[in-house]
Amino acid sequence: MASTSSRIAFRRSPSISAYWASSCRSGMRMKASSRSLPEASSRGCPNGLGGALCWATSVVPGTTGTATVAIVTSTAMVATRAMVATNLQRRRMRSRDDMAGPHGKGRTGVVMRSYLAPRTLVCVGVRPVRSANTRKEQVMHSTARKSRPRAAVVRLLLLVVALIGSPPCAAFATQVAPGQDAWFGLSLPPGLQPHASPAIIGDRGPVPAMVPAGEEGHRELEGARIQHDLETIVGFSRASRELHEIGGGQLWGRITGFPSGAATVTWAAEQFRAAGIAEVALQSFDQAVDESFWLPLRWEVRLIANPVFGARSQDVVFETAMPLSPSEIPGGSLTAPLVFVGTASPAELVHIDVAGKVAIQHVRPQAHTVFERSPTVARAQDLMSRGAVAVLTVIDQPGNGRARDFSNCGGPCFNLGGRDGLFLERVMDAAADAGTLDQLSVRLSLETERRSGLSAVNGVAVIRGSDSQEAIVLNAHADGWFDAAGDNADGLSVLLALARHFAKPENRPERTLVFVASAGHHSPGMNGPRSFVAMNPELVASSVLVFNIEHVAQRNLSRARSLFDDGYREYIADSGEAPIVAGITNRSPFLEDLIRRGVERYGINFVSGASTMASGEGGGYRSLGVPIVTAMQAPPLYHTSGEVLETISTPGLERMARFLAFFVREVDAAPLREIDP
């Protein structure tokens, strides 16, 4: 559990000052009120200060903050002061992008204000505190006494009384009239925290994997072993970010055509060899000559400050902004006013003029963003046709992350994370109420490039069966955006587990098994499955079935009862995996029955209805004319920076690996007429 501490530095001098710790967390905001204050008790004053300095802490249940406050008294005039310095200790050092709290709480910075009332000056430090039934408790420490955990969400109302003679606390705050908070007093968005879960991951783990009798000895299929591979695969993505493989490092992943993609596939091939498979190859291929790879190198979405939004307002950079292919901005940047269009339906747009403005549309995906592509892109194109100069799409998803989805919007388009979007929409509401909405503007900047002439590599392993006239192909793509733990590090790690399993002499199949760690799922002109088919005509000619393993073990996330400090709804992981679609292109009753048996035997969370889909990598095998079976989830973190290790179910990895081993054994022993009637 992370902890926080609050320190107050005291100095006996005519001008008492407080020292602010170096790593303040932005979720803290300095507030004050001119309302009447309770009398402060002199009890509890630190020893040796002779009543000249006291401290107190006030907690009001059901409100939003707590603080430790120093009360300064002297003999010349009646004044009241409360001074707070907060130093938040983090569990580990973070890079510049990681300055938000462990669950996206805020960025570094302190805002302070004071109000003058007759005979009173109050400067109060407020630190939001999580309740015990949400993510964590925070502990406030003072130099005067030890802290104690707060189990309820609390808020400071403090206090204090007064005396004579000391100068006002101008050393700590500038006097500002009420209503002059930055950005209408709204909490700033938390910023982007790479590699951190956007959802609550509690202590109650997923349901343990079911291990049928007789399968206890298959240690290579255990979740902990597969999890080790998962962590290694995600490590290639994290290295991509650390090395700034793409531009300034705002976009990272295991990217086909770049070192991260090649390193992942090369490592997978090494695992095939280490399993004892004799036939292992790295098969290189080139990007199609008529294709290019659009990549954003550096970008920024900046909300422009103006004193009419609060005297202390400063520009806000939305760190979750993600430009969409193939956006370009002539000259590299544009500045324009904002207009909110809601869902951008025709009924809404008939009342809205978007010409010359940056339009903001709001999307709440039902599952992952794939299901929103057609309507979202069509609406963005419509906005562009009506004269909008750019479109920002707020995606209402867990936490506050980058989402790389949607494309071909007809002009410059960016996605925004949910909490960035919430802040922007609230600023627009407040500006509208204040009559200053027409003064709200945003600056977009974007640097891109197009890559062509790239090369890619597939990793292929072949286990010859006792009857090598027929083959079963198992495929998992190796590339992915951001950490890509669920798309598709989980699928690739399960593929490696199956290779280890069937490489054992006692598990040798009758039919030949072909394992493909494919490239190019996300890179134009470098489709791994199609290239594998083209480069291995004899091998694929003998195939009787293809199984595509693609996002198979991400934990299911539900909307939580709790809220972030800014009011944005939290998400929480439950005890199972997200639903998995089992697509069977030929609707074979035998294959459908294997799916049903998988639910009963291993507890796989397959959806209840049949499907013929062969999306993802499965589509690259359609030319073979054989049944294609696909296992695929549609979780909300797909293609987002929130798709991190913590969101993957270790028992879920084992469930899928054991089910697929069972599935392959059954298909291996079945006659062709049952597989493809």
Image (tube, rainbow, N blue to C red):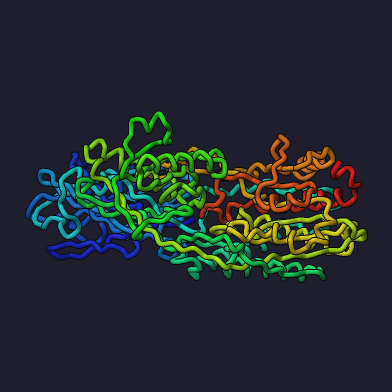
Number of marks in the rendered image: 0
State the residue in front, 303 or 613: 613
In the image, taking residue 355 as reference, residue 378 lies left or right, namely right
Q: Position of residue 63 (x, y in %)?
A: 35, 40
User: Looking at this rendering, what residue extends furthest in the front direction?
Assistant: 290
State the residue in front, 399 or 489: 489
Is 536 located above or below residue 486 in the figure?
Answer: below
Asked if one can make out residue 585 in the rendered structure from this viewpoint, the answer is: yes
Image point (49%, 61%), residue name? 295
Q: Position of residue 403 (x, y in %)?
A: 49, 51
- Quarter assignment of residue 438: top left
Q: Position of residue 404 (x, y in %)?
A: 51, 52
State the residue in front, 271 or 48: 271
User: Looking at this rendering, what residue extends furthest in the left direction?
Assistant: 76
State the residue in front, 414 or 34: 414
Image point (14%, 63%), residue name? 15
User: Looking at this rendering, what residue extends furthest in the top direction?
Assistant: 347
Q: Position of residue 507 (x, y in %)?
A: 87, 59
In the image, taking residue 615 as reference, residue 440 lies left or right, namely left
Asked if one can make out residue 93 in the rendered structure from this viewpoint, the answer is: no
Image point (78%, 52%), residue name? 624
Is 521 located above or below residue 430 in the figure?
Answer: below
In the image, taking residue 450 as reference, residue 646 lies left or right, namely right
Is 378 located above or below residue 500 in the figure?
Answer: above
Give the quarter of the figure containing the C terminus.
top right
Image point (44%, 42%), residue name? 380
